[in-house]
């Protein structure tokens, strides 16, 4: 009987220990101001012990698009870096950030929003030249982000012609 109780107690403790499933949304809101609310997780890219998150927030009536870097330490996701900007009506809006990982490696991140319906694709500079990246559409708005990317950002139309370009020189 005593052995059954011990086994049941161990199983219970194991299951309770596995319940620490903090959501990405909770992690992001925990690092924001008290008035900031994450309204949507638009997309996540995970590789190894790193996760890049594109998300929308609202605080005091202001809507923003943000990108954050989460890194896993001791089996737990931690918010380590982030940036964002208020929503804009510019045809193409792009920003760049550079962050360090726990290991001291640099991650360059491009992110932005698209407000021109003629823009059909986005290309960013990668190590081996320009590469098309995904466009994420939500609630009538379009956003993009990409790790290990640099300026310039090129917006192309249906014919593959560059119609807007953002450079940060």
Image (tube, rainbow, N blue to C red):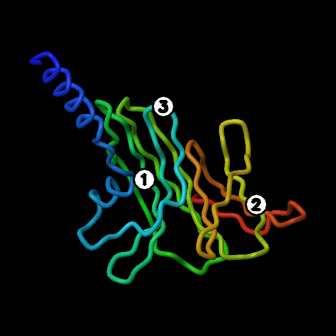
- Up-down relation of residue 69 to residue 34 (above or below): above
- Kindly indicate the quadrant of the structure image that contains residue 164: bottom right
Outermost residue toward the bottom in this view: 61
Between 163 and 13, the one nearer to me in the picture: 13
The residue drawn where x is 48% and y is 31% is 48
Residue depicted at 47% across the width and 65% down the height: 40
Crowd around label 2: few <14 · some 14–19 · many ≥20 (10 Å): some
Query: How far is disc 1 from disc 3 in space, using C-alphas?
Result: 16 Å
Number of marks: 3
State the residue position of label 3. Answer: 48
Q: Which mark is residue 127?
A: none
The reply to whether the C-beta atoms of the residues labelled 1 and 3 are less than 8 Å apart is no
Q: Which mark is residue 68?
A: 1
The label shown at residue 121 is 2
Residue 153 falls left or right of residue 168 = right
Can you tell which quarter of the image residue 21 is in? top left
| Nearer-N-terminus badge (2/3) | 3
**Residue 92 percent across, percent down from the top left:** 65, 70
State the residue at coordinates (48%, 60%): 41
Q: CA distance from mark 2 to mark 1?
A: 23 Å
Can you say whether 6 is above or below 103 in the image?
above
Q: Position of residue 30 (x, y in %)?
A: 27, 58
């Amino acid at each position: 009987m005593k052995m059954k109780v011990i086994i049941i107690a161990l199983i219970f403790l194991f299951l309770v220990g596995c319940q620490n499933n903090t959501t990405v949304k909770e992690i992001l809101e925990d690092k924001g101001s008290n008035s900031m609310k994450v309204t949507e997780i638009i997309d996540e890219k995970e590789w190894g012990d790193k996760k890049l998150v594109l998300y929308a927030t609202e605080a005091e009536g202001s809507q923003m698009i943000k990108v954050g870097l989460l890194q896993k330490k001791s089996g737990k996701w931690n918010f380590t870096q982030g940036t964002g900007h208020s929503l804009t009506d510019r045809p193409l809006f792009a920003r760049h950030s550079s962050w360090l990982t726990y290991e001291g490696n640099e991650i360059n991140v491009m992110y932005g929003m698209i407000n021109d319906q003629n823009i059909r694709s986005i290309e960013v500079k990668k190590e081996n030249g320009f590469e098309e990246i995904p466009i994420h559409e939500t609630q009538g708005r379009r956003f993009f982000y990409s790790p290990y990317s640099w300026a310039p950002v090129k917006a192309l139309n249906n014919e593959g012609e560059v119609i807007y370009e953002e450079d940060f020189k």
